Amino acid sequence: MIRYSFRRLALLVVTLWLLTVFLFALNYFFPGDPLTNMSGVRASNPEAYQQQVVARNFDQSIVMQYVSFLGHFTRGDWGQSLTTQRDVFADLMPLLGATLELSLLAMILAMVLGAPLGLYAAGQQRGAMDRVVMGISLSAYSIPVFWLAQLFILLFAVKLGWTPISGQLNPLFNIDVRTGAILIDILLSDTPYKKAAIADAINHLWLPVIVLAIMPATMLLRVMRNSMLEVLQQNYIRAARARGLSESRILWLHALPNAMQPVVRQLGLMFSILMSNIIVLEVIFNWPGMGSWLVKSIYERDYPVMQGGLFTIAALILLVNVLVELFHAWRYPQVRKELYAEH
Amino acid sequence: MSAILDIRNLSIELETDNGLVRVLDRFNLQLSEGEIHTLVGESGSGKSLLAKAILGFINPRWKITADRLWWRHYDLLSLSPAQRRLVTGRDMAMIFQDPGSHLDPNEKVGAQLQESIPSGALKGIYLKRRADRKTRAERLLHRVGIKDTDDVMERYPHELSEGLAQKISIAMAIAHNPKLLIADEPTTAMEPSTRAQIYRLLAKLSASQGMSILMVTQDLTAVVPESQRMSMIYCGQLMETGPTQQLMAEPYHPYTDAMLSMSLFNQDLPPKTRLPTLKGAIPTLQHMPIGCRLGPRCPYARRACIHQPPLEKRQQQQFACHYPLRDDPDHE
């Protein structure tokens, strides 16, 4: 396990390093001055520009430029925004919090919804309810998320008026942004209206969370159902029955843990899909997170912001995937044998 | 003779696209207490189906009929599925030919072994019960010949060799002291030395605990000397049954005779001679011959063989053949 963890982590480091090489190269591929693209300082401000030339080794070879870029990057000096002149790294943290809050809640909802429904469908195999559940899941899986979001807004926010159309919180509450995750920020703040603020935040949250959770939930449901059906055919389940173990014991202690194995393996992939959906959704729901920030920076050709956003999302997806793989290998020891081949 | 397992005229029919196919045809088997009975047949002869029918692993698409399917004083066919599972779960156990796949890959061997010990047998309260469970598990491992119990209990199934996995399956199967152990080709995938070990172990268990064992195999060389009786099965029909030594020495049925001559017991054949075989192939399920199913392959078949011969008894041996060997001067 230690060897395996080391290998995964080494792979993570190498991938992240390649990502920085790619980001550095982007500065040259983007139109305009590479130094401006990198630091956000324009040549129209000669003094500051000259400072950047020296600080980022732009008077030296390209290798030295990369070394300096890596140094700035790892120190958290990601340049400043071309449009707002604010520090990219400092701006990014609260946005990341808002995105993580949304994605975590959606992920949890997807698991709570998808896994039991998958088990239920497996139990009703080829029955009427199985077909209904699988049919609904297939149609929900096929609807593009941007369209589904618009439909839900139209129905729940505009027609029924149950929830605000967009945003994270009513500005009246005046909560200081610290982590960016709105529920945590409210709890950290000293506003006298905590309960009302939380209620309002949840009122804003539930619709995007549901829209976001639908796709991973349907994926989970299908994987869960199929793997459960497969596990129930396995010899060790039949052997357990032959030994006279109770049916509930077989289901909960032998079938379910084994059926969860492919589900866990899929979690990383699900997170990647969730992240690409979240970018679209944040724009639609006007959510102050990474996604809407990144999309805005693309519209505005704000290259330092684009780099920061790209790197963060890519690193996040990589990190989650590696963590899922590590958890998978730790929880399911028989997988490790396949990974090393036999020895 | 008091048979604890009494099977008379058991037939199993499968629903297929070509209608009902009778895969087990009026099969008879009696097993008494503490007896090792070896059931020999080629693959596809219905021996595993028989084992499943006894244990009650029944697919709803199978049609099972029998004049008698009795286990001790229970008529297994008239019990409800729940009652039947209770009886078979308490009295019977089975070990399989691919032991590795019959262990939960996600759980340590020790935990699985402890799980198979019935809670009713434990003494004491909570913590003491757990300790008792553990010592019982260790004792089970000792009984199947595993000395390094602590190491083995901490392993996952994929870290076991086939022989070790089979020993553990046996330990799990005997955890609740079953009266009948069905061993369905328990050593097919194993090396000869491990194979001998497993058979010796099973014979010892039968002797020491009065456990009856139905040993299912396709290999006559795997018949252990401790086996008291054996039956030959071909394509779902019982060919011959009787005391093992007697059957091996003086078979009446041509099938038994052919199997014996094929299994290369102490035969001194010169190099490059053709090995004795039974001509032809096992018929497919859809094209079973009528009458005696060995008919088309039998070297002694005659016209009467299109009718299924009744079981005939010679002392302790029973066979189903119109023209038994050692009986008929025309034979050889």
Image (spheres, rainbow, N blue to C red):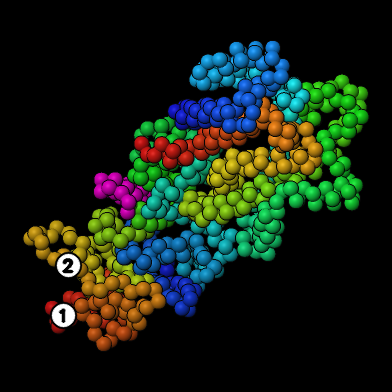
* Above or below, B112 relative to B179: above
- Front residue of A105 and B159: A105
Q: Nearer the viewer, mark 1 or mark 2?
A: 2
Q: Is residue B90 left or right of residue A170?
A: left
Secondary structure beneath label 2: loop
Residue count near mark 2 (Cα–Cα under 10 Å), binned few <14, some 14–19, many ≥20: few
List x then y, in percent, for residue B217.
32, 59
The structure residue drawn at horizontal position 63% and vertical position 48%, both measured from the top left corner, is A220
List x then y, in percent, for residue B82.
59, 60
Which amino acid, mark 2?
Pro
On the image, numbered disc 1 is attached to which residue? B331
Residue B297 appears anywhere in the view: yes
Q: Which residues are magenta?
A: B188-209
List x then y, in percent, for residue B278.
22, 71
Q: Main secondary structure of the magenta part?
A: helix
- Front residue of A131 and A211: A211
| Lower sequence index among marks 1 and 2 | 2
The structure residue drawn at horizontal position 71% and vertical position 44%, both measured from the top left corner, is A213
Residue A250 appears anywhere in the view: no
Secondary structure beneath label 1: loop
Label 1 – label 2 distance at C-alpha: 18 Å
* Above or below, B290 relative to A319: below
Whether the magenta-drawn stretch holds residue B29 is answered as no
Determine the chain carrying the residue at label 2: B
On the image, numbered disc 2 is attached to which residue? B276
